[in-house]
Image (spheres, rainbow, N blue to C red):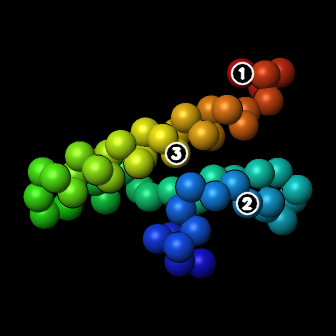
Amino acid sequence: MTISRERSRIITLADGSNGLVTVHPSYLLRLPDETTRTREYDRFVNDLRLAAGCLDPAMT
């Protein structure tokens, strides 16, 4: 799987549960410039919001 192509997508895992493809947080620390870091941080926060919206309320 290519993270950059599949990022921000909900996928069905082998056990039938859902997973979200996103970057590892350390990726954000290794970006070369502030503009890119800001853009990618915003994308990561949006991924986390997407994941939170998919949680089963009974599980939280």
The residue that appears at 41% across and 56% down in the rendered structure is 24
Using the rendered view, name the quadrant where residue 53 is placed. top right
Which mark is on residue 60?
1
Q: Residue at x 77, y 51 (%)?
A: 18
Quadrant of the image for the N terminus?
A: bottom right
**Local SS, label 3:** helix
Q: Is residue 20 visible?
A: yes
**Whole-percent x, y for residue 29 in the image:** 22, 53
Gap between marks 2 and 3 measured at Cα = 13 Å
Q: Which residue is mark 2?
A: 11
Judging from the image, what secondary structure is the residue with disc 2 in? strand
Is residue 1 or residue 4 the one in the foreground? 4
Q: Which residue is mark 3?
A: 47
Foreground tag (2 vs 1): 2
Badge 3 amino acid:
Asp
Residue type at tag 2: Ile
Image spot of residue 54 (x, y percent): 72, 37
Can residue 29 be seen in the rendering of this structure?
no
Crowding at mark 3 (Cα within 10 Å: few <14, some 14-19, many 20+) = many
Q: What secondary structure is found at the residue carrying circle 1?
A: loop
Closer to the eye: label 3 or 1? 3
Outermost residue, left side: 33
Q: Amino acid at mark 1?
A: Thr
Quarter assignment of residue 33: bottom left
